[in-house]
Image: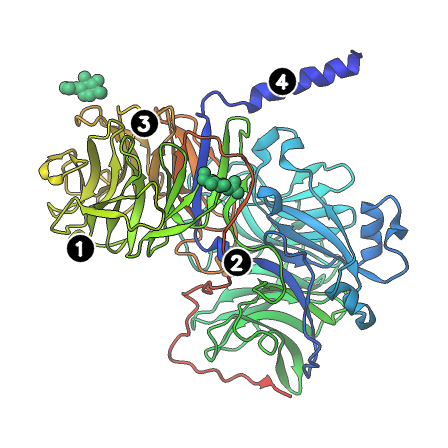
Amino acid sequence: MTISGLLILVIFLFYSLILADPNLGAGTIIFTTVGRSLYGFDIFAAPVDFCYSGEGELRLTDGVSVNYNGFFPSCPSSVLSLLHPNPSAFGDDPFDVLVYVTERSGYSTIYADVLSSISDTSNRRKVVGNPTRLQFPLLPPPSTTAGGRTSVSMKDRPSLFGDRVIFVSTHEPSHLPRQSWAAVYSTHIPTGATTRLTPPGVADFSPAVSPSGRWTAVASFGRRGWSGEVQELNTDIVVFKTEDGSARNLMVEHGGWPCWADEATIYFHRRSSDGWWSVYRATLTDQGADPLSLVSINRITPPGFHAFTPATATTAPELIAVATRRPTSQFRHIEVMHLNKGGGNAYVEVTRLIAPHAHHFNPFFSPDGRRIGYNRCRGGRSGGDPPLLLENIESLSPETFSVFRIDGSFPSFSPDGRWIAYAGLPGIYVVNSNGSNPREVYSGNAFPTAWDWKRKGVMYTSQGPDFAAESTQVDIISLTLNEDDDKAEPHIKKLTSGGTNNAFPSPSPDGKWVVFRSGRSGYKNLYIMDAVEGESAGIYRLTDGPWIDTMCNWSPDGEWIAFASNRDDPERVSFSLYVVHPNATGLRKVVPCREGGRANHPWFSPDSKSLVFTSDYAGVSAEPISNPHHFQPAGEIFTVNIEGSDVRRLTHNAYEDGTPTWAPFYLKPANVAESGQDVARCRFDDCRWLSSPDQVVDASDVSSC
Ligand SMILES: *[C@@H]1O[C@H](CO)[C@@H](O)[C@H](O)[C@H]1NC(C)=O
Ligand SMILES: *[C@@H]1O[C@H](CO)[C@@H](O)[C@H](O)[C@H]1NC(C)=O
């Protein structure tokens, strides 16, 4: 072996030691992401015409996974020469470059696709039919980056300047509870060298680089942190030098999603005091001033409709693209605002004329200002990947455990590894763990799912509404599946009666008992009952107090019951995680509720030494307005040692992740398609809080041809 070969081996062993994680049990973690399987996002582009020409839209991304938040570099040929040793690789045809976020390969990263020119209609068939495409990942994959898998993270909002890609990433911990990990970075594309532009301890979102490249504007939390905002983040517009993050200067208080029209003009959105989201213009000191400072702020879009996520075209400074929600539509659409046209601003609808019943997000202009790009769910017409039942997610420790997102809530594995159960809210479903033969086994609303350890095919759940008060009619049932006949109706047995919100059953590993939470005393506390006969065979109260104990899980070694509780501060519904022995001794807090943060849904690792849980400790990772509806725009999956040490973040995204389970089987890290689903379903809601302030009607003038 050569010296360098030996060196590589030593480095490899060194990294293997770091990466193989003796503290986390082997197995598979499966969790839920609210809405994600419905998205099927791709990037599309449509012409910006004052009279809609009927030319329609082009799908620019390839239909693999989800693709969103695009950017067109102004000089495609210099981008191609940066990426390809032979820039003539694309032939003589004119081309465009699209930079975007993609979640293919189980992690979020940034790609550049080189495409036939989208503005050249003679080329259109090439893009639509069989797209000529060169595809380049712009960032090194997580497993090869120094520091290994710790660089698993969310990436967002890319833009390109020179040989650098500027973007948001969440790969460095914020170290403060509920402070977002989102920060702006700059990666040198030829070498992969990455610089952080956001100061330590600060969270920045939605970066935009000025036309000269000299300045970057962001929506910043400063050091204030996230205080649980689910609609508009209380961010400010901050500007700094793109080169190194220096000359950082607060430009506008209260604003998000900046974009530059020229070196001295920034457009941004904020929710106005009259309740409407509106686009504003900040005029800065003239070009060349260093640092820049604010001269004036003007509101651009009037009350009467919501307008947000503005985008500018540097070649057409009179055009601003926005997403709107008009009182006349439940859908989010892209419009182009023509400033000072005929005495006022004129609005041109782009997407409503093409796909009136779909949501369209986050517009951006082509370099010539003639096309507008945006994300929408691809649906059935344009092909692309169907939804996944199990989507493999990059694992922090792939040698020890695999991680999957499941298209359902409250998943759990049968102890023999044969089946996965999950809740459809409504409905309980069972599917073979290789994804085959999904079937509904219970049609009412029920949650969660938990399998008996000893009696094959027996599962526990609670029937009734979720998120309900103590007195709500919710009762625990067991379902016994017929192992030999998938079509047979399962046998249903009611284990509690009285319906005082009896929920979250979790059986003991000896098959004798079920722990659950009940509101029977007027408070939700934990109880234990007979697994076969239910409460009629006697009931034992495990916890007692005027607070909420809930979401219980019995450890595989039988020693502990983990649960979530607000007993520290019963006035608030922010849970900490606790463990207690089944004989009610040894109560201990494992994960505190940290500065208002929540820890929910604990589930034991197969070796009973760790818990996987969901929490909002990592704050939010993107402006909520730039995403579809989530009950809350935070929620990531974490693990913790049951002694309370070694908290690790497993997921990074701008969605809401929850209800994890941890199975003793190592499921091969590969996607499993949903049987019977061959097109992306697009049934998701826009942000539900984007309703209209009632007192105002839509008074603006939309041009129609
Ligand atoms: C999946 O598992 C079931 C049950 O074990 C088996 O019958 C089926 O052939 C498997 N399907 C695939 C595609 O592996
Ligand atoms: C309670 O259970 C724990 C764990 O099984 C055990 O170590 C302890 O001795 C028990 N205590 C009593 C009082 O039974």
What label does residue 473 carry, if any?
1
Residue 596 in the figure: left or right of residue 154? left
Amino acid beneath label 3: Pro
Residue under label 3: 556
Q: Residue at x 41, y 71 (%)?
A: 691
Q: Which residue is mark 4?
A: 14
Q: Are marks 1 and 2 in contact (CB under 8 Å)?
A: no
CA gap, disc 2 to disc 3?
36 Å
Quadrant of the rendering where the N terminus is positioned: top right
Quadrant containing ligand 2 reads: top left
* Residue 660 relative to residue 246: left or right: left
Residue 181: in sight, yes or no?
no
Residue sitting farthest toward the front = 484
Residue 230 screen position, x and y as percent: 41, 56
User: Can you tell which of label 4 and label 3 is closer to the viewer?
Assistant: 3
Between the residue at mark 4 and the residue at mark 1, the CA separation in whole angstroms equals 56 Å
Q: Amino acid at mark 1?
A: Gln
Which of the numbered marks, if any, corresponds to residue 39?
Answer: 2
Where is residue 210, by image quadrant?
Answer: bottom right
